[in-house]
Amino acid sequence: MSNPLDDMMKKFSELLPEPVRNLQEDLEKNMRSVMETGLQKMNLVTREEFDIQTAVLQRTREKLEALEARLNEWENKQASATNQNEQGGAN
C-alpha cells in the first residue's frame, strides 16, 4: 500500500515543467518537509485512533440508551404507584 503523501508528491512532480523536474529530488525533500510540518500542525489522528474512539462512543451510546430505558421504566412505575395511591386514598 502506497503512502498518500508519496502519491501526492508524485502527482505534483508530474505537473512541473521539465526544467524544474531536474531539481525534483531537492524539491521533493523540501515539499515533504513543509507538508509534514503542516499536517502535524493540523492535529490529525490515525485511522486506528479514530476507529478506537468510534467504538468507545458506540459503547457509550448503548449504555446511555440502556440507562434511559431503565429511567423511563422507573418513572412509569413511580407514576403508576402514585396514581394507585391517589385512587386508593380517594375511596
Image: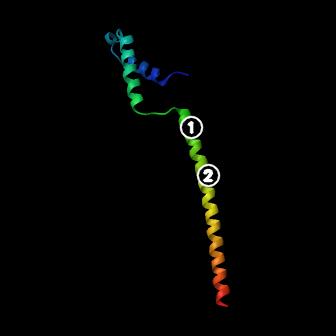
Q: Residue furthest top?
A: 22
Residue 28: percent from left, percent from top: 39, 16
Q: Which amino acid does label 1 sit on?
A: Asp
Circle 2 Cα neighbour tier, 10 Å, few/some/many (<14 / 14–19 / ≥20): few
Q: Quadrant of residue 17?
A: top left
Tell me what residue is drawn at x 43 percent, y 18 percent: 10
Q: Is residue 44 above or below residue 6?
A: below
Circle 1 Cα neighbour tier, 10 Å, few/some/many (<14 / 14–19 / ≥20): few
Tell me what residue is drawn at x 39 percent, y 25 percent: 37
Tell me what residue is drawn at x 56 percent, y 46 percent: 57
Q: Is residue 24 above or below residue 73?
A: above
Q: How many labels does the image show?
A: 2
Q: Nearer the viewer, residue 73 or 20?
A: 73
Residue 24: percent from left, percent from top: 37, 12
Residue 67: percent from left, percent from top: 62, 58
Upstream in the sequence, badge 2 or badge 1? Answer: 1
Where residue 51 is drawn, which disc sits there? 1
Which element carries disc 2, helix, strand or loop? helix
Tell me what residue is drawn at x 48 percent, y 24 percent: 4
Q: Which of 41 and 82 is in front in this view?
A: 82
Q: Mark 2 points at which residue?
A: 62
Q: Quadrant of residue 9?
A: top left
